[in-house]
Image (cartoon, rainbow, N blue to C red):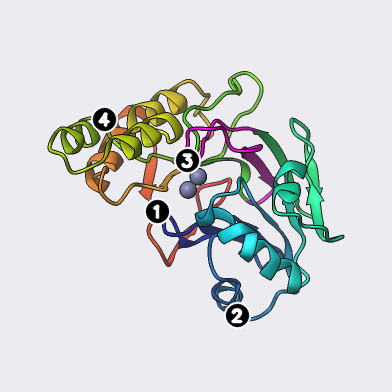
């Protein structure tokens, strides 16, 4: 299995888990033509696209990229509330059932859970989701982005093999930028209330059973409030695992076993 990182961060998010037979798109925060290109214009192995929430960088402006995917006959999986928000009515727009494994294609299963995320006005998003994705090649994968915290306690319930998780900002950097007047008040508070800090990311990881984890991929780093090298170092030292900081147009081997 490979993890293709097409785009990560507040400009746009799109990731693909792909083996020879199947491909699962995670997030539609990118023009669909770019996603098609990444799949060599072959959509036949796409089992579907998962979408976490309604922000432009995950679904396009007013769900534009969700509609583009649907127009290309790709099945899009998200919450019923998200489809209702964008008035999307299409037989290929499928509601996921939270806290259950939903089958996608032959090889994938996805277990959606509640994320904690809000809009610019600090009102909560309609139904933001995180995912646990299973495929025999990459095992159990935790995928969590745009979430203040990780609500479910997975320890004792799920043993992850790989983890893809947001590490958006670091408190030291964001606080000093705010004090220096480089950020306005509302943006500062919005980030603090809706995105995962490096410390929360570390604590979330350490609250889980990491004994079977091969790789940890840090995603959705803020352009201004993060430091790639520091983030990698902090998470590596805390977990003792292989840590990658996601970059656009990056491909990582993503397997259950180290080979
Ligand atoms: Zn985002
Ligand atoms: Zn968001």
Tell me which label, 4 or 2, sits earlier in the chain.
2
Per the image, the residue denoted by label 3 is 165
Which residue does the image show at 35% across and 31% down from the upper left? 189
Which residue does the image show at 79% across and 37% down from the upper left? 97
Per the image, the residue denoted by label 2 is 40
Residue 102 is situated, as x and y percent measured from the top left of the image, at 80, 42
Q: Are marks 1 and 2 in contact (CB under 8 Å)?
A: no
Q: CA distance from mark 1 to mark 2?
A: 21 Å
Residue placed most toward the observer, 49 or 215 = 49
Secondary structure under tag 3 reads strand
Per the image, the residue denoted by label 1 is 246
Residue 113 lies in quadrant: top right
Tell me which label, 2 or 3, sits earlier in the chain.
2
Q: Are marks 4 and 2 in contact (CB under 8 Å)?
A: no
Mark number for residue 171? 4
Q: Is mark 2 within 8 Å of ligand 1?
A: no
């Amino acid at each position: 299995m490979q993890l293709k990182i097409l785009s990560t961060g507040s400009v746009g998010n799109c990731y693909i888990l792909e083996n020879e037979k199947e491909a699962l798109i995670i997030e539609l925060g990118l023009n669909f033509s770019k996603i098609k290109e990444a799949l060599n214009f072959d959509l036949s192995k796409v089992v579907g696209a998962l979408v976490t929430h309604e922000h432009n960088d995950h679904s396009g402006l007013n769900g534009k990229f969700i509609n583009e995917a649907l127009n290309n006959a790709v099945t899009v999986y998200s919450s019923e509330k998200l489809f209702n928000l964008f008035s999307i009515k299409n037989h290929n727009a499928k509601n996921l059932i939270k806290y259950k494994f939903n089958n996608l294609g032959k090889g994938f299963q996805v277990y959606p859970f509640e994320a904690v995320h809000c809009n610019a006005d600090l009102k909560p998003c309609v139904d933001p989701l995180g995912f646990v994705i299973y495929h025999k090649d990459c095992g159990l994968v935790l995928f969590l982005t745009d979430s203040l915290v990780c609500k479910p306690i997975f320890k004792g319930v799920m043993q992850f093999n790989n983890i893809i998780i947001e590490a958006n900002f670091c408190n030291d950097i964001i606080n000093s930028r705010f004090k220096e007047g480089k950020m306005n008040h509302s943006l500062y508070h919005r980030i603090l209330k809706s995105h995962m800090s490096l410390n929360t990311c570390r604590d979330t990881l350490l609250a889980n059973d990491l004994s079977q984890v091969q790789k940890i991929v840090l995603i959705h780093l803020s352009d201004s409030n993060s430091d790639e090298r520091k983030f990698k170092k902090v998470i590596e030292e805390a977990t003792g695992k292989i840590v990658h900081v996601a970059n656009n147009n990056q491909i990582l081997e993503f397997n259950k076993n180290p080979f």
